[in-house]
Amino acid sequence: MATSTSTWPARSRRAAAALVVAAALCITSTSGTAWGVRAHTWINRVAVRTLPDDGPAFLKAHEDWIAYLSVIPDAWRRPSEPFLKMLEDPNHGWFKEQFSFMTEIPRSRYEFVLKLYDEQRRLAAAGDPAAALTNVRWTGTMAYAAVEGYERMLTGMRTYRALRERKEDTRFAELEIAYAMGWTGHYTADGAQPLHDTVHHDGWQGANPRGYTTDPRVHGLFETRFVDLMQLEGGDIQPKVPAARRLADPFTAIVEHLDEAGRHTEQVYRLEKAGALADATNVEARALVIQQTARGAALLRDLAYTAWLKSGEPPVNDPGGNPIVPAHPRYNPATGSAPAHVAPTPSAAKPTPPPAADAGRGFRPIAFTDPVIGKNFYLLDAIGRTPAVRAAVEQAPALKALRDAKIHALAKAATSCGTDTACIAAAFSWSTADVAAAERALAALAATNADLRALAARDLRPSGMLQAHSAADDAALIAAAWRETAAGLNRIVDTYALGTAPRYPKIDAVSYEPASEAYRRLVGIMAAVLHEQRDDLTTFYAPTLAFARRLLDANRRDEAGRFEPMHEGENAAAVRRVASVRWADFAYTAILVPGAGPDRDDVALDPWAKMRLELAVTRFRKGQAPFILVSGGYVHPNQTPFNEALEMKRALVRDFGVPPEAVIIDPHARHTTTNLRNAARLALRYGLPATTPMLITSDAGQSAYISSTEFHDRCLREMGHLPGALGRRLSPFDQEFTPSPRALHADSTDPLDP
């Protein structure tokens, strides 16, 4: 068990100073091993036991060795070995509140440390006591320890395969791989323990309106004493471990694993306050331990499985070359290296080729029943407006049973949870088992129900909203759409009921203080209202969908639906004009101008954005394209009343004399990545020629960023794909861009702009 505490960077000076003292006291007040020997050992054992037959099955012969190694990293943290302790201690924590100032987690341990150092210097210069805890020791490096362990497994497996190919002895290679898996399991297990992923590591820190314990012994009480009290066994964990999967990007999967575990921090404190951690029969406490240990085992197993599959493929070196060579385009002299690239998925291993001649044909603008729901969860929107399919879904026995269970949970939430938002959220969230059950039922229904197959053929596929799964058969297409839907619904509940930080908390987070009595009462009222309306919630997904929609509405997070349907509103004149354009007269279909959000509440259009418009208008007047496409949503400052794209259109018409029918707006994008993605969507849906590129015009800084490997990797990391292919660079301000139909796929992980 780690013995640290931490603090929020933005806390008051007095609170920060007090926490420095508290942190020092914790060093001598707690001891032990994270999760205890029992849980660590079982996590590693279950990971080995659930390796699939097409994985590194030879590791099953080394289960005892891998289990023994599960607690060894804690032995590397004794003060008697100071060099080793200084190196190892940070690897056991990931106190994410400490680095909330980072917009992205660097794909380099050294870049991460330097960013912390820069922030520490800034805080120290301002006289902020929080500087004392803004460093690698009080922040943690667990994500890096885990991904480095994964790569050790990968290199060992390559050696193993080479030895086996040469028919040589593989025993030492097997021990090397087992060693790497054993100690990597320590970090995946630590990361699954919620108190290893928060500043509330050893007792609640700072504002404490619910009166949670500040005793640092809460850490050991949860992960060791209660685990021993409930007599956790492998048989408890293994049934909760899902089937093995290949991880598209192990580092991203690890960070998401740590983030997910951290969401259960307050649940641990609530259980302790209720005395549940002293009761071996407490259902919720037992379920939390089993759930999190199963997730730790699953991640370790998936890292080993992914390493095994990749070890059978030719090594893919960093696209920019050796990361420690100064010629690398992302080389940082301060670290002597470049950050790691994003691991490409099997389908994205090659650069996105330009679309075929007919790639953009057939897609049309869409009018949704409810744009917020339709854009996030197109499958549910399509089912809801197709009576025969809706009836089949309502009547399918397995789906009806899931609906009945949700209604029962809703009743409990409305009558028993009060203002306990964690209790309410649990009633609406989808468990892994229930997601899988619904997936099986929907796939079976698709195999037997002609109406559902017809919906896939005439609606789901032509819409482009499920474009990532276009090659799948109907059953697989619908199953994949449901998995994404369930994950998106859970994300909305986590973010806007529980207050879990989204990827970009400064602009996307809950609009109220989620721990306040007023907001908790509001969430409780939502549950009560839905309980009264339960007879109207006739499909298995309806209770959670209705709850998620109300959460977005309460937080004024309806950005995804604003201006829709755009082809009948702000973009109607431009859409009508498309058919009459003589495309042979133009080099480009449109000039794309990404927005820039102002940093002041009273500024409607940022000066940077207006200068970008000047550049675009010059090119428009030269006849390079028939349209200017402006992109940007309600982004900066948070909850701004001004929309970037709309304000840019107004300026183009009012200040530059551009005809309104020559302007297309994308009023939804919240990032540079989605500026390109949404522009690609509009071009394809509005019938702009698919094989003719657009021209991206911006200031030199943003234009260079769009061309960078960093931006390429960010697109893969955040969206899972490239929105199109970048072409020639024409000037410091201009680069060609050809949209890809893959950009049409809806992204329910970003509910404000899916």
Image (cartoon, rainbow, N blue to C red):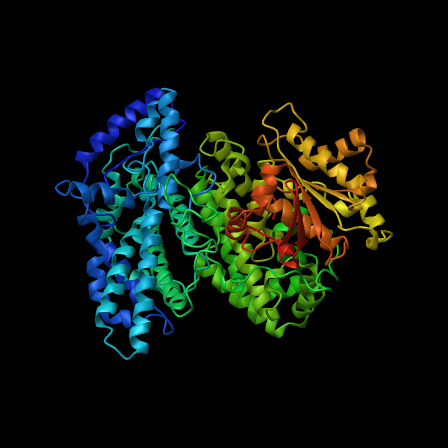
Single out the residue that lies furthest toward the right: 580
Residue 463: x, y in percent?
A: 69, 59
Q: Can residue 317 be seen in this view?
A: yes
User: Which image quadrant is residue 172 in?
Assistant: bottom left
Percent position of residue 184, x then y: 29, 56
Q: Residue drawn at (70%, 37%), measured in percent from left and top?
A: 645
Q: Specify the farthest residue to the bottom.
A: 167
Q: Is the residue 312 above or below the residue 736 in the image?
A: below
Name the spot of residue 205 as percent of width and height, x first: 33, 31
The reply to whether residue 373 is visible in this rendering is no
Viewed as shown, does residue 251 lie left or right of 600? left
Seen at 22% across and 40% down, the residue is 86
Residue 155 at x, y percent in the picture = 33, 63
Judge left or right: residue 204 versus residue 408. left
Left of 42 or right of it: where is 505?
Answer: right
Q: Is residue 313 above or below residue 663?
A: below
